[in-house]
Image: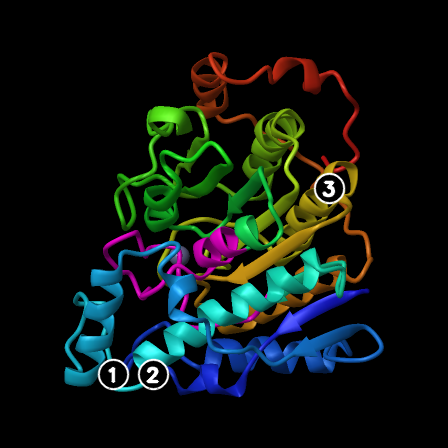
Amino acid sequence: MGTALVYSEKYLQHRPGQGHPERPERLEAIVGALKRAKLWGEPNTKVIEPALAKRENIELAHDAEYIALVEKLSSFEKPLDVDTSVRKNTFELAMLAAGGAIDAGRAVLSGEASNAFALVRPPGHHAGRNRGGGFCYFNNLAVMVERLKREFKLKRIFILDIDAHHGNGSQDIFFNDPSVLYMSLHQDGRTLYPGTGFVDELGAGEGEGYTVNVPFPPGSGDAEYAGVMRELFVPLTREFKPELIAVSAGFDALADDPLTQLGLTTQAYGWLTSCVVEQANRLCGGKVVLTLEGGYALKLLADAAVNVVKVLVGQELEPPQESRRLPVIDELKKKLASYWRLEQHLKIVHTCV
Ligand SMILES: [Zn+2]
């Protein structure tokens, strides 16, 4: 048991181009900081070398035509969009990133690890069923979730997406799916790419009520996140009763991130993880899997990732002193009242916030 870290040096070979923020140094900074903190390998963590995802597994989250398109663009080195260049090795490395997410999930569900963090590149949460973009090719976390659902007969998976950008790809893949509750905490789409993720995007068909978007105004930080975790995340997880909590772990909500305007501290990432682990301990035997998404301020990114892994291996981190209620909380509670009984869980005393 213990914490599994999934990583391959091959992930450093993904080079989107000169001056691109999604660069190999991001993972080098994280791995270096984990080594210095003695969190890399025995006795504290187990490092797993990932296997390439099988095409049939990628097809669980993406259309076959889209997968073929990424493969073709790779051979011609044609970009997916202006921010998302494609090189000869992109197709294979995107398959390896999805494979890393699957291996992290499998380690936890098989009981080989109590929780896991897939330290993968390229990231995935902007990749939808038939499109990529925003530095993403295949949706690593979605591929993992779809694979685990089948392999371990899971009926309820909670996804918490804490990347500063809305995970429009993940939302697209699970929009009609009541077996996956997708909750995204992100900077307001009126002020940031991809311009989606508003409170009235709630899912459709059988999946109505299973998509929850929390847009934060620019400048929001630890206190605002604390309010949302206490008043929305905790009651939602208790109502949904997941068998696994999967986290799209983007570190670009950190203050100083060059692409966004949020203000989380590195400690907040540890505390957010504590909150997730606490609910997972209560609801699903502690089963938590994280996959790396964005995060572009190298030093802070590495420190925050260390805090996340410290919590995964069992250290506790204090919640922020202050909790501030954003108006969006009441707005969402009103909308979610048709689907979820959130109020009853607010009476419970939470230690996580
Ligand atoms: Zn992002």
Residue 342 placement, left or right of 278: left
Query: Element type at marker 2?
Result: loop
| Label 2: how many Cα within 10 Å (few below 14, some 14–19, many 20+) | some
Which element type, helix, strand or loop, lies under badge 1? loop
Q: Residues within 10 Å of mark 1 (few under 14, many from 20)?
A: many
- Percent from the top left, x then y, of residue 148? 56, 54
Residue at mark 1:
87
Residue 218 vs residue 47, the one in the foreground? 47
| Ligand 1 contact, mark 2 (Cβ < 8 Å) | no
Q: Position of residue 79 (x, y in %)?
A: 17, 73
Q: Quadrant of the N terminus?
A: bottom right
Circles 2 and 1 in contact, beta carbons < 8 Å? yes
Give the mark, 2 or 1, whose residue is nearer the N terminus: 2
User: Between disc 1 and disc 3, whose residue precedes?
Assistant: 1
Image position, residue 128 (x, y; %):
30, 52
Task: State the residue at coordinates (74%, 38%).
Answer: 352
Q: Quadrant of residue 308?
A: bottom right
| Residue beneath disc 3 | 284
Camera-near label (1 vs 3) is 3
Q: Which is the main secondary structure of the residues drawn in magenta?
A: loop
Q: Is residue 30 above or below residue 191?
A: below
Q: Is residue 151 left or right of residue 197?
A: right
Residue 15: give its label. 2
- Helix, strand or loop under label 3: helix
Q: Which mark is residue 246?
A: none
**What whole-number distance in Å separates the C-alpha atoms at marks 2 and 3?**
38 Å
Q: Which residues are magenta?
A: 118-147
Which amino acid, by three-letter code, is at mark 1? Arg
